[in-house]
Structure formats: structure tokens, C-alpha cells
Image (tube, coloured by chain):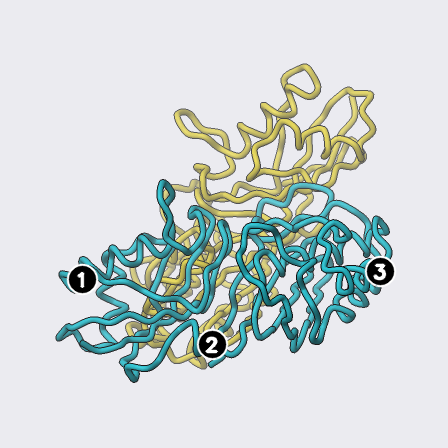
Chain colours: A yellow, B cyan
Amino acid sequence: MARYRCIMEYDGENYSGFQIQPNAVTIQEITEKALSVLFGCDTKITASGRTDSGVSAKAQVIHFDAQTDIPDNKIPYCLQQILPDDISILTCDKVNDDFHARFDAKAKTYSYKILLTNINRPLYKKYYQYPYKINIDLLYQALDKIKGTHNFKAFMSSGSDITNFERTIYDISHLQNKDCITIRITANGFLYNMVRIIIGTSLDIARGKLDISVLDKMFETGDRSFGGSTAPAHPLTLEEVFY
Amino acid sequence: MARYRCIMEYDGENYSGFQIQPNAVTIQEITEKALSVLFGCDTKITASGRTDSGVSAKAQVIHFDAQTDIPDNKIPYCLQQILPDDISILTCDKVNDDFHARFDAKAKTYSYKILLTNINRPLYKKYYQYPYKINIDLLYQALDKIKGTHNFKAFMSSGSDITNFERTIYDISHLQNKDCITIRITANGFLYNMVRIIIGTSLDIARGKLDISVLDKMFETGDRSFGGSTAPAHPLTLEEVFY
């Protein structure tokens, strides 16, 4: 038996998220089935973390244990014959037995794409097509205020059994090209829907629906109801996992 | 009756090209049906030119004649309720009766996206995922040689009744970001599959399958058989039409 570490890319559009669950097609299930076919025995994977329904990944990291004669650098090409078109194993390397994709992850970067438009744009389907006029400076001010170490309980949707809500956002960067804005958030960890609530609340502030002072209230009280909307899932992409 | 000029965006993936034809769903047909519903009478459109099956457009230009009380700047929003998600009218303006989307077009810019990769990349479906090792300098040299005024007959697929094959390519630019290459070609006109043959032949040169001297042979003889492959349609996008 050896341990393998893979980087995988997937388009989450047609999946009910990463993590295996009954009565829904998930990325974990499809990937485990492909590995089980390739190695001829049940193979389970562990990811750096789950991604939600509709969320994509450019570099999700997983590990699994397997016994095989296939050289590790050939495994991605073999899996390509089995996996569907929207899931791909980009790299595969043998690693030490004690490597753990989830426990060893130190930080992650997610990106979120926004297109400011009030008319349907067929070629920008992976963007959040946002129809409201916004004050861009206010958007960036809000994002700036969210950086750092905070109690992010108010930035979490219910449905998680986590009890420690402190996270550190190392960086929030924004790249703007005309009406397209790409926001990248790097943190030591993310709560359930945290990025989507950060984006939704910041946009609500930038369009004048909420005052920027709600952010302090959210940090102080941990009360989700002070926050803004939860932005849609499809523009969210896991960009990198740091070890 | 007034004449209207529209800029439209579409994802060509699910259509048999722009131009109306029997037994196939085309962008022209769907757009004319939507306009006919909106105005309550048969409405025909004229585009700057057809785009082939699978080809997309960020700024196709069309004109049509209609009699309506709807203000021209409201027409895109009305059509949004009728058109499918992959076709959109971005702008609509009343113009002089003598404006003609095809005859008045002076030049067009197409873009073509290449991703150099030998493994499936789910999040780059609009790219030509090119699995061969290439000499990038040679790719750019080939594209450079194609610039200018030439007899482009050898860069045309059969199935067109055109007799004048001289075109002028004003510019071919390339933007590279790691393994992603975006090529933009601006010309006073394009023959059937011309961009796709330019890209396919230049890539064949860059991977060493063809010598760069084939370009001269193609210009001199007008013989398509000297050229390389026809690159796939889906990464090709009409970016701009100049009047």
C-alpha cells in the first residue's frame, strides 16, 4: 500500500458538491468509483475539504491509499479514460504515509467572479451577473475590513456542527477589468458558505442596501441576520490549497 | 418602419451556426422568432456575416426593420424574456435606413483560445486543449508571416461560392498567460474556416509537423492541401465588427 496525493480540477455545475451523500451525485463518489475501477478494489479519497453544490475547483487536493503497478505519473492519464469530462486528475504523486490532505492543509485560496451587468451575458456563465449599480470603492473598503482574524460566526450558514468560528483571512485581492471583477480570498480555513456570505454582504454594502458598519456588528455579535445575502455558488472556485 | 442596429452575444455551442437553414437550429432562426413575437409580425435580421456551427460571438452586429412603440433601449430587456439563455441582445439603437450590417462592415476581429495541455481541463472548455509540445516562437513567427494582404484561397474550406480570395489581415496579436494563449486576428474579411485553418496550420508548424515554408506555398498556389489541420470551432469567437 502506498499513499498518493493528487491535484484535481472539476466543474461543480452538475454535482451536489464534493462530499459523498445518499441520493445525489457528488464529485467524491464519481472519483472514488473511477479509482476503484482502475485499481480493482474499493478506494476511498480524502480531500482538503468539501466544496458545496455548484462550486468548482482548479486545484483541489486529495489523498488516497492504493496498491498498484501503475507509475504515479501515469495515473492521471488512466483515470481520464474513466472519469467524466467535468472531473480531471491533473497530477498524482506518491507521498509519505503520514500526508493528510485535510489535516495538513495550512490555507486555501478561493476566487469569486462578478460581472456588473443588467443584461444576460451568455459567455459569462461562470460569473455572478450582478444587475445593481454599485460603488466599487465601497466594495473594496468592505472587503478590506473583512481581512484579518475575526469571529466569523455571522458569516456562516446554519447546517454545520463547528464550534470554533475564529478564522484568519490573510489576504483579499481584487482584479478589475472593465465590468469584470475577480476577488481572491486566502484564509487558514473557511466556514460553511463563508465566501458567499462575504461576497453577498460586501455587494449589499456597495449597492447601498446595508451600511458598512454591519461588518463590525457581525464580528461582535456573531449574528448572521445582520449580514447580507449569500451570493450564488457557481462563480466560486477553489484555486489553491497550501501545505 | 425604422431600422435598428443591435449588438448581440451568443454561445454557439448548441447551434448549427448563425445562418438559417432547414432541419437545424440556428441563431438567426431563434433571434428572428423572438423579434417576431415581440413585434407581432414576421421580422428578418441581417448580420455582419455568418458564424459557423459552434462558433460564439461577443459582439455580432445585426440590423432589422420594425414598427414598434417600444423605445429602442428597452428592446434588449424585452427580448431577454423571450430568448434562450445562450443568446442575448446587448444593445439596440435606431439607425439610418441605409445602414447595412453586412455591406457596411469594414473589418472584424476574431479571437481563438488555446490551452497547451495533455490532460483534460474541465474549466477550460472554451479552449482548444492542445496536447502536443510546441515551439512557441515558431507559432508566433508563423502567425506573423500570415499578416498582410494575400491570396487566402488555400486557407478556405470547400463549400463556399466566393471567387475573390484576397483578404488583408491588419493585425494578429497574441496574449500568453502560462499555458493559455489567446490569438486575435483582425482582417477586412474572412473566408470560410479561414481563422481555423490559420490556427491549425500555425500549430502544425509550431509542433514540427509542417515546415514554415508551407505558408508561402499556400499563398502562391492557393492549394488547401499544402496546409495543416482545421482547428476546432468552439474556441473561436467573433469579438468585434468595425464600421
Report the residue marked by disc 1.
B38
Report the residue marked by disc 3.
B212
Left or right: where A155 falls relative to B179: left
Q: Is residue B98 above or below residue A66?
A: below
B192 or A48: nearer the viewer: B192
> Residue B147 location in percent, x, y?
72, 73
| Residue A103 visible, this orientation | no
Residue reaching furthest front?
Answer: B163
> Residue A6 location in percent, x, y?
70, 38
Residue at x 56% of width, y 63% of height = A184
Left or right: where A211 falls relative to B135: left
Q: CA distance from mark 2 to mark 1?
A: 27 Å
> Residue B79 location in percent, x, y?
25, 62
| Residue A121 visible, this orientation | yes
**Disc 1 secondary structure class:** helix
What type is the residue that disc 3 sits on?
Ile
Sequence-wise first label, 2 or 3: 2
What type is the residue that disc 2 sits on?
Ala
In front: label 2 or label 1: 2
**Disc 3 secondary structure class:** loop
**Which chain letter matches label 1?**
B
Residue B207 is tagged as none
Residue at x 15% of width, y 72% of height = B68
What type is the residue that disc 1 sits on?
Leu
Quadrant showing the N terminus of chain A: top right
Q: Is residue A141 above or below residue A129?
A: below
Local crowd size for mark 1, using a 10 Å CA cut-off: few (<14), some (14–19), many (≥20): some
**Which chain letter matches label 2?**
B
Residue B105 is tagged as 2
**Disc 2 secondary structure class:** loop
